[in-house]
Image: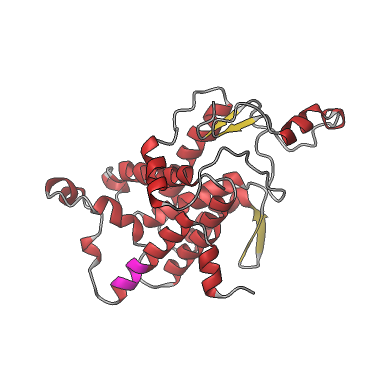
C-alpha cells in the first residue's frame, strides 16, 4: 500500500495542480486569509474595474470544507486523473485545452443572468465527470456500494442523487452542457463527417512546454479493456495519418470480419479526427 506522499507524487500534473489549487483555496478561506467575495465571478467588477482575476479564480473555489467539497475533490482525484492517465495519456496540452475550453464555455453561459453563479468550479469538475462517462461508457461504477451501473449513466445518476438530497441541479447541468459541447466538437461531429474545428492552440502547447510538466507525443491511443466501444472505425489522433499495427491486424483479420454484430450498437462508422487528427 502506497503512502500519501507516494500517491501524491504519482498523480498526473494537471489534475494534481487543479486539485491542490482547490484545496489551497478552501484552506486559505478556513484560515480567514481572504473572503469569497474577492475571487467570485462578477462581470461588472471584472470588466469595469479590470479585476480580471475573477474570471479565473472562481474556478478554484469548490466551497468551504464540507462533505460537498470533499466529494468534488474526490471527483477530480478519480475521474480527472483517470482521464489524464487514459485517453489523454502523453497528451498534456490537449487535456489542458479541454479544461480551458470548458472554463470558457462556462463563462459564456454565466453571462446569462439566470445561469450565473459566483463560483463555477463545481460545474468544471462535473464537466470532467461527463467527459469521463463518454470515454469509458461501459466501465462499471458502484455508488455507495448500493447501485452498480455503467459509466455512461454516471452523470445522470449524480443528477438524480442531487435531486433526492435537495441540492441545486444548475451547477451539474451546466457542467454537462460544457462537457457535451466539447465531446460533440471533438468526437461526434468529426465522426459524422464534419470538420474538426477544436484543434489545441499553439499557445497551449507552448504553455505546457514552458511549464515542463507532462508530455505531448504522437502516439496511438491504447484501448481500455474495461471500457466499451462507443464507436467503430479508424481513429487518427495527434496527426497520425495511418492505423497502428494493432489496428491494421484487427482490420485484416478474416475471423473478426466474419463475426456478426452482437448488439453493441454503433452510433457512427468512419474516421475519428481526435485532437489534431488529419
Q: Position of residue 143 (x, y in %)?
A: 61, 63
- Judge by depth and name the residue closer to the eye, 149 or 272: 272
Give residue 24's quadrant in the image.
Answer: bottom left
Q: Position of residue 108 (x, y in %)?
A: 31, 41
Please tell me whether the stretch drawn in magenta is mainly helix, strand or loop: helix
Residue at the left extreme, as displayed: 49
Residue at image position (49%, 23%) is 195
Q: Position of residue 85 (x, y in %)?
A: 57, 52
- Judge by depth and name the residue closer to the eye, 218 or 24: 218
Would you say 27 lies left or right of 42 here? right
Residue at image position (38%, 73%) is 65
Q: Is residue 119 visible?
A: no
Q: Looking at the picture, does residue 225 appear above or below residue 262?
A: below
Range of magenta residues: 24-28
Q: Quadrant of the C terminus?
A: top right
- Judge by depth and name the residue closer to the eye, 54 or 44: 54
Q: Position of residue 112 (x, y in %)?
A: 28, 43
Would you say 192 lies left or right of 109 here? right
Would you say 57 lies left or right of 67 here? left
Would you say 247 lies left or right of 160 here? right
Amino acid at each position: 500500500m502506497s503512502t500519501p506522499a507516494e500517491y501524491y507524487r504519482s498523480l498526473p500534473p494537471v489534475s494534481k495542480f487543479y486539485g491542490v489549487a482547490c484545496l489551497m483555496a478552501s484552506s486559505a478561506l478556513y484560515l480567514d486569509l481572504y473572503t469569497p467575495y474577492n475571487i467570485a465571478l462578477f462581470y461588472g467588477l471584472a470588466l469595469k474595474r479590470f479585476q480580471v482575476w475573477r474570471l479565473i479564480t472562481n474556478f478554484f473555489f469548490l466551497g468551504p470544507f464540507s462533505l460537498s467539497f470533499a466529494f468534488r475533490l474526490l471527483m477530480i482525484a478519480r475521474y480527472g486523473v483517470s482521464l489524464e492517465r487514459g485517453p489523454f495519456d502523453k497528451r498534456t496540452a490537449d487535456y489542458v485545452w479541454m479544461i480551458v475550453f470548458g472554463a470558457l464555455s462556462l463563462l459564456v453561459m454565466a453571462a446569462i443572468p439566470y445561469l450565473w453563479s459566483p463560483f463555477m468550479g463545481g460545474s468544471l469538475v462535473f464537466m470532467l465527470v461527463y467527459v469521463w462517462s463518454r470515454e469509458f461508457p461501459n466501465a462499471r461504477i458502484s455508488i455507495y456500494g448500493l447501485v452498480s451501473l455503467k459509466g455512461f449513466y454516471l452523470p445522470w445518476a449524480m443528477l438524480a442523487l442531487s435531486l433526492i438530497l435537495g441540492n441545486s441541479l444548475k451547477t451539474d447541468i451546466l457542467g454537462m452542457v460544457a462537457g457535451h459541447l466539447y465531446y460533440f466538437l471533438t468526437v461526434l461531429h468529426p465522426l459524422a463527417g464534419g470538420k474538426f474545428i477544436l484543434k489545441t492552440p499553439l499557445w497551449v502547447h507552448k504553455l505546457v512546454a514552458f511549464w515542463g510538466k507532462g508530455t505531448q507525443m504522437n502516439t496511438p491511443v491504447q484501448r481500455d479493456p474495461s471500457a466499451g466501444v462507443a464507436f467503430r472505425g479508424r481513429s487518427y489522433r495527434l496527426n497520425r495519418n495511418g492505423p497502428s499495427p494493432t489496428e491494421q491486424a484487427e482490420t485484416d483479420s478474416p475471423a473478426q470480419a466474419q463475426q456478426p454484430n452482437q448488439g453493441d450498437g454503433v452510433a457512427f462508422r468512419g474516421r475519428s479526427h481526435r485532437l489534431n487528427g488529419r
